[in-house]
Image (tube, rainbow, N blue to C red):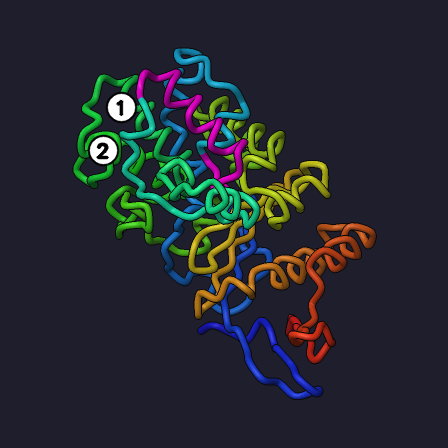
Amino acid sequence: MSEILLNYTRAGKVESIHRGDIAVVDVKGKVIDAIGDAHRAMFWRSAAKPFQVLPFVKQGGMQQYNITGEELALMVSSHSGENLHVELTNSILGKVGLSANVLACGPARPMDGRASRELVKLGQKPEPVHNPCSGKHSAMLALCQMLGLPVEGYTEDEHQVQKIMHQAVAASACLSPEKLEIGIDGCGVPVFYLPIYNMALAYARLVKPESGNWGEDEEAITTIRNAMLEYPQVVAGTGRIDTVLMNLTKGRILAKVGAEAVYCLASVPDGIGITFKIEDGGHRAINPVIIGILKKLDLITTAEYDELIAKFPPILKNHRGDIIGTIETTF
């Protein structure tokens, strides 16, 4: 059963709460800490992206199409729609011989406020390239091109490219494919339903490939990890905690958001994967829970903690800017 992770207070009284579940797992699969139900099943959403791109990397797609590490980071991103992200999306598609009009993720307003305002200023509408999942879709299209599969219908669960990715994600989470249920994600492709324990295990294996029993996939998964850690700005965007955290810890912590407040973290030196799910899907709960977990597990220094608190202060303000409440972790 989910437990209370955050209290939102006003005048010293609890006004709102967020419940959730947390699983902390080492690279060998041992649960080393948990709050709530470490085996709660949930949709992985965009936090599955590092494993969806695995078949493309493993089968030599980067070499075949001259894909850079920065472009690979875009393939696993939930990006903010900044100019850098749009340029990388177009670059990937151009390298595989396609244009942006084949993207089937749908248009989306950039998550980055400045990028969104710039579109309005220019009188332009959001396009699929601004969708935070355009990198993932570019990777799917690139895999289609590499394997000679039809681009048409690439988002459907019966398309061969989706079947290939389904198998890769299942194996990454140490599950058989038939145990990995699917739904449809916000960008129109299959999304995976599995225990948060297995999500955390996959991230532990991602950051410590040499100990993760990847077999012939080890080189590819190492390449994916390195791309994420080398290009944090691409993985998320300006001011977002994924990017801030990877930059602040100099790649010691890897971080990846999923929609509906599912989130995955991992400590590279320790081979520890962390997944949490906020029960009500409230995005506002993500930052304070991340900071609280990292502090609880002693995975960040005092200076790093202080900087995260300064960037993401656990306080509530009114419209005048007065501090009128706090955000407090309960663990």
The residue tagged 2 is: 154
Locate the C terminus and report the quarter of the image it occupies: bottom right
**Residue 226, image x, y percentages:** 58, 28
**Above or below 30: residue 102:** above
* Residue beneath the point at 33% across and 53% down: 193
- Along the line of sight, the residue nearer the viewer: 277 or 106: 106
Per the image, label 1 sits on a secondary structure element best described as: helix
Residue 90 shown in magenta: yes
Judge by depth and name the residue closer to the eye, 47 or 22.
Answer: 47
Q: Amino acid at mark 1?
A: Cys
Question: Picture coordinates of residue 83 (x, y %)?
Answer: 53, 34
Give the numbered dot on residue 144.
1
Q: Is residue 17 left or right of residue 280?
A: right
Task: Give the label on residue 209, or none.
Answer: none
Which residue sits at x=69%, y=67%?
A: 314
Expressed as whole percent of the image width and height from the top left, the position of residue 142 reads 33, 23
Give, as a three-letter code, the residue at label 2: Tyr
Q: Position of residue 327 (x, y in %)?
A: 66, 73
In-image side of 314 versus 208 (left or right): right
SS class, disc 2: loop
Q: Residue 46 vs residue 253: left or right?
A: left
To which quarter of the image does residue 225 belong? Answer: top right
Q: Are marks 2 and 1 in contact (CB under 8 Å)?
A: yes
